[in-house]
Image (cartoon, rainbow, N blue to C red):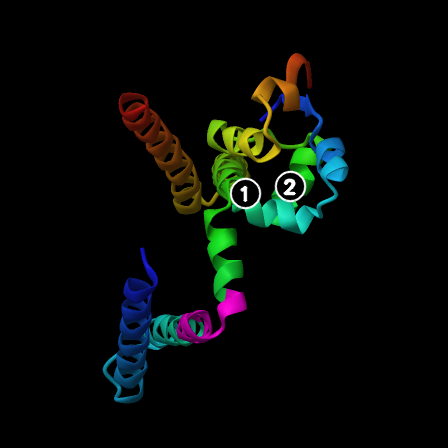
Amino acid sequence: MNHKKRMIASICWIVIGAALMGAYYAGMADDYWNGMGTVLFVVGVLQMIRHIRYETDKAYKAHVDVEAGDERNRFIAGRAWAWAGYSYVFIATAASMIYRLAGDDLMTQMAARSACLVMLLYVGSNFILRRKY
Amino acid sequence: MGHTMKNRLEMLRKEKGIRQEDLAQALGVSRQTVISLEKGKYNPSLSLAFRLARYFGMPIEAIFDDSDEQT
């Protein structure tokens, strides 16, 4: 995604966030949507600040371009996602056992199913990537 | 990446009298990547290996040694 598209995305987050917060203060939405709107609004504003700095500060632009295109950074990002996935499966499986021992069937199922979902996503991703490369 | 190759990057860079920042800029990578390459903690992509070889004006085999990979 180039910076112009990211700028548009930031504006969208700000508008959606403001709309959700507005809906909450108008009594049309509950706390969940207010929280979601606040997060979107803050993320949108922070991204907008970064984009403006990117457009106006040449040194920062050069730094961001190098960091974004750096192959080691991409390698680390891929490994970090892999570790996150492995960790999640183990943590969710352990959590499902703990919830089972505590007698909470709903949380047991939620944790076990989420672990299964991640593993299914892995199998699907692996299948697609094997065909691609 | 479980295996990293030995390399002569640090020696070649110092022979040329350039800083890590300058090498990083010439290669279009971050300084941290150059540091990791020199320490043998990260194997470069084929593309980056070719850029390094062109930069130092020598074949890839003269920079990297895969005969005794570190585990």
Amino acid beneath label 1 = Leu
Between disc 2 and disc 1, whose residue precedes?
1
Residue B37: image quadrant is top right
Amino acid beneath label 2 = Val
Residue assigned mark 2:
B34
Which residue is located at x 45 percent, y 73 percent?
Answer: A46
The reply to whether discs 2 and 1 touch (Cβ–Cβ < 8 Å) is yes
Which residue is located at x 51 percent, y 52 percent?
Answer: A66
Residue assigned mark 1:
B27
**Which region shows up in magenta?**
A47-60
- Prevailing secondary structure of the magenta residues: helix
Q: Nearer the viewer, residue A48 or A62?
A: A62
Identify whether A75 is placed above or below A53: above
Q: Along the horizontal axis of the image, is B25 left or right of A41?
A: right
What is the chain identity of the residue bearing mark 1? B
Residue A55 rendering spot, x and y as whole percentages:
41, 72
Q: CA distance from mark 2 to mark 1?
A: 9 Å
For label 1, the SS is: helix
Q: Is residue B64 visible?
A: no
Which residue is located at x 27 percent, y 74 percent?
Answer: A16
Report crowding for label 2: few under 14, some 14 to 19, many 20 or more residues within 10 A (C-alpha). many
Residue A43: image quadrant is bottom left
Residue A45 rendering spot, x and y as whole percentages:
41, 76
Q: Nearer the viewer, residue B57 or A106?
A: B57
What is the chain identity of the residue bearing mark 2? B
Q: Along the horizontal axis of the image, is A29 left or right of A118?
A: left
Q: Nearer the viewer, residue A100 or A63?
A: A63
Which quarter of the image is occupied by the N terminus of chain A? bottom left
Which quarter of the image is occupied by the C terminus of chain A? top left
**Dot label at residue A3:** none
Which residue is located at x 30 percent, y 24 percent?
Answer: A127
